[in-house]
Image (cartoon, helix red, strand yellow):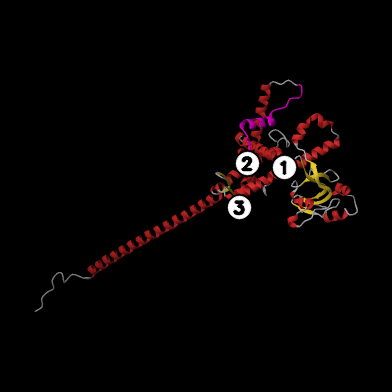
Amino acid sequence: MVFPRSPEESLPQAPTQRRRRRRRMSAEDAQRQSERRVQERRRQKIAIGIGAALVLVVIAIVGIGYYIEFYKPPRELAGQVRDVRFTMGDLVDRIRVLQGINRYQGGRVDLSTVPFEYLQDMIQAEIIRQASRGLGFSVTDEDIDQELRRRFLPTPPPGQEVDPGQLDQEYDNALTTFLTSTKLSEDDYRRLVEEELLRSQLSLLIDAGIPSEIEQVEVAWIRMDQDGAADPQEVRNRLMREEFGQVAAEVNVPDGFTNPQGYVGWVPRGAFPELDDDLYGNPARELEPVPPGEISDPIFTQEGVYIIHKISGPEVQPLRGFQALADMGEGAFQSLTQEDRDALRQELRIRGKLAQQEVDQWFDDQISRGSDEEWLKIRFDSELYGWVADQVQLSAPRVSGGPPVGGPGLP
């Protein structure tokens, strides 16, 4: 006997299966979409992370560039004298100060060599500032005031009556005009004046130690520029058949110590160190001096090429200084013949040259001793000096013009 199907069995099955498949597919789609969203969020996080990293890298590069190019160089050590430090920024400021003064004079700063030279000046100024009291001299504010008045106070014509108050006003105006034109602060300028006075004091101290009579040789010479038109050997060959004075009058490049015929006069050892071996000989190097009456071969020095005619000596000769001139008085000086006045002026020039050489030697000795004892440091770095030169080059001209050299504010 056959029984009929139940109602559930008699319903169609396909729709139910389709629903189940749809539910499975929806669940799978949801899972896939969820996975895609997770992956997309992960990619977004990675992209954001990479972007942030790139931004940080750019910021780091910019920051490092700023640090290297702008922040670090002016703070780098340039030099140090005991506890006084000079940075490259200080050196830039120093050169800009002197740049203003040079432009006021109508000159310019040579940036190919000046950074290290001015660093040496700063080091030397600090050395003498620290050593001055031990040497027995100093510069006070009153000394600086007096020097400023010497430079800026107008000098009325002889016999003219002038109100002192008016002169003081003109002094203030002249000083203010100078500082404004050069864009210097009064403190900066007073410090420069102090350094100049300290150097003058050192020169006077060293000059006082030079004897008034000293062994010297009498010479004439011809000086030529190393890159000049005259060929030194050809000039020497001419001197074998022509008079020394005649040749000197044609080819000598004046150096402030010769007359038109090349005559110099009496020269002590040390005044021209690069010529000492030829003038006085050098037993340690087994070098003989040029004999009296003879003419040397060309001598190549930093100052040029010299051909020396040694006239006589060595013998002890007077070497008077400015104190002798002061003791002589204006009347006695004017009573001298022109030849004697010229001879005295030449003695003063030669003595000044010898004193300057000894001042330079004093600084060299101080720098050498300071380096050995480690209380002095000087930074030798061409890249940093290049940075200094670039910074100074960026400085706008201080003034369009100014008085000639020797005008107000200048020694």
Reply above or below: 350 against 55: above
Residue 282 point in image, percent of width and height: 75, 54
Residue at image location 66% in from the left, 36% down from the top: 197
SS under mark 3 = loop
Name the residue nearer the viewer: 124 or 392.
124
Q: Earlier in the sequence, mark 2 or mark 3?
A: 2
Task: Give the quarter of the figure containing the N terminus.
Answer: bottom left
Residue 371 disc label:
none
Contact? badges 2 and 3 (CB < 8 Å): no
**Residue 192 in magenta stretch:** no
Residue 355 disc label:
1
Range of the magenta residues? 135-159
Q: Quadrant of residue 105?
A: top right
Q: Which residue is mark 3?
A: 381
Residue type indicated by callout 1: Ala
Q: Earlier in the sequence, mark 3 or mark 1?
A: 1
Residue at image location 72% in from the left, 42% down from the top: 355
Q: Is residue 121 left or right of residue 1?
A: right
Q: Which residue is mark 2?
A: 128
Is disc 2 surrounded by few (<14), some (14 to 19) or many (20+) residues within 10 Å?
Answer: many
Camera-side mark, 3 or 1: 1
Residue type indicated by callout 3: Asp
Residue at image location 71% in from the left, 43% down from the top: 356
